[in-house]
Amino acid sequence: MSTSLLYHGFGIHGYQYIRTLYRAGAIIFCIIPNAFSLRCPVCGSRHVKRRGAKTRMFRTVPIGSKSVFIQLPVQRIECLSCGVIRQVKIKFAEWRRSYTKAFERYALALSKHMTILDIANHLGVSWDTIKDIQKRYLTKRYKRPRLKNITRVAIDEISIGKGHRYLTVVLDLKTGAVIFVGDGKGVDSLKPFFKRLKYSKAEIKAVAIDMSPSYIAAVLDNLPKSTIVFDHFHVIKLFNDKLSELRRAIYREAEGPLQKKVLKGTRWLLLKNSYNLNEQKNEKERLEEALKLNKPLATAYYLKEDLRQVWSQVCKSDAETILTDWIKKAQSTGIAMLQKFAKTLAGHAFGILNYYDYPISTGPLEGTNNKIKTLQRQAYGYRDMDFFKLKIFGLHEAKYALVG
Ligand SMILES: [Zn+2]
């Protein structure tokens, strides 16, 4: 061991190596400050007098499986320039921490690959110590995300935990970064976001949302110049939900066991895209049999297949024609569910067709939501909601984004 190894291996300089102790399986490096490095912590003057010292231990990066500590008599000085009597600053550790900066950096590096519990076990410290290190880092980095250059965002809510607890998440569609996490859902949850956005002077060009009235109102009120794009996955999902309801109603009213038998188990077949039907399992035949049996179901099914076409045109005007035709067709079926859905689409056509001006969706947010759910499963009960939210901000950064 040498003073230079102390510097290169443990990031400690301005101190002199004295000796190494081996105690209870741990390695302890004893060091003292270089005499010339003594300064007043308040005014920086070198004109100081020693006033006793207190020995402190700092945990630093381990050597293999051995814990390593730095033992240092922390000097108290009297400043002859400004008159204070105080402990000098320690260069290699943050104020009041019992571990070194190198230890913090190491714990953060491990955080990209391991859970908090793994790291705590590996480094021989408590779960809370690692959590605190992560929290300070994440706070510094994500407390105030820069919003100025953001132009396209997606907004959606995610349910977390077992209760009906929601978070509203806003994603920057350019970088894939989460830029806001709000408590609850609906307009209120977004208020702080819009406030910050206004302050940042960002010019949001387009916003992807689902068709819920509260989001529409929130965007119209707060971002009147931006273009609303209704997420097409949500539109299709909404139709699929209605289709399932229709099937259920038909099933309930089906006469005789044969009809019931044919309809049974067709729910997933109805929702599948036709080109995904499995030939080996006779899915196509089974579906056709069910559709033959029931005209309204068949009508709804084929309209579902048509609906997707709205998003696969080469230009907006073609899409508009397709959408208008679809609405007319659905209205003329005489099937209440389809007529109602046609009305919904007619009322939201503008935002559906805006897809051709801004081909965005909340799809990327779906991936983030899945990661949030994984994060939540790995976490040991996120009683600390701020910490959980900070972790969400960190999600897109690393492959294992500060897991657990
Ligand atoms: Zn001073």
Image: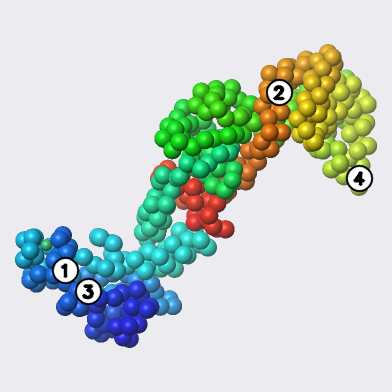
Q: Residue at the spot x=71%, y=28% of the render?
A: 353
Local crowd size for mark 4, using a 10 Å CA cut-off: few (<14), some (14–19), many (≥20): few
Q: Residue under circle 1?
A: 39
* Circle 4 or circle 3, nearest the eye: 3
| Circle 1 residues within 10 Å: few <14, some 14–19, many ≥20 | many
Colouring mode (rainbow / by chain / secondary structure / one colour):
rainbow
Q: Earlier in the sequence, mark 1 or mark 4?
A: 1
For marks 4 and 3, the one nearer the N-term is 3
Dot 3: element? strand
Q: Is mark 2 within 8 Å of ligand 1?
A: no
Q: Above or below — where is 87 with respect to 17?
A: above
Q: Earlier in the sequence, mark 3 or mark 1?
A: 1
Please tell me in which quadrant of the rendered image residue 215 appears: top right
Number of the label disc, if any, that sits on residue 279 = 4
Asked if disc 1 and disc 4 are in contact, CB closer than 8 Å, the reply is: no
Query: Looking at the image, do the residues carrying marks 3 and 2 touch, with CB atoms under 8 Å apart?
Result: no
Q: Residue 379, position in %: x, y?
A: 49, 51
Residue 167: percent from left, percent from top = 51, 36
Res 367 seen here: yes
Name the one closer to the observer, 155 or 389: 155
Residue designated by label 2: 349
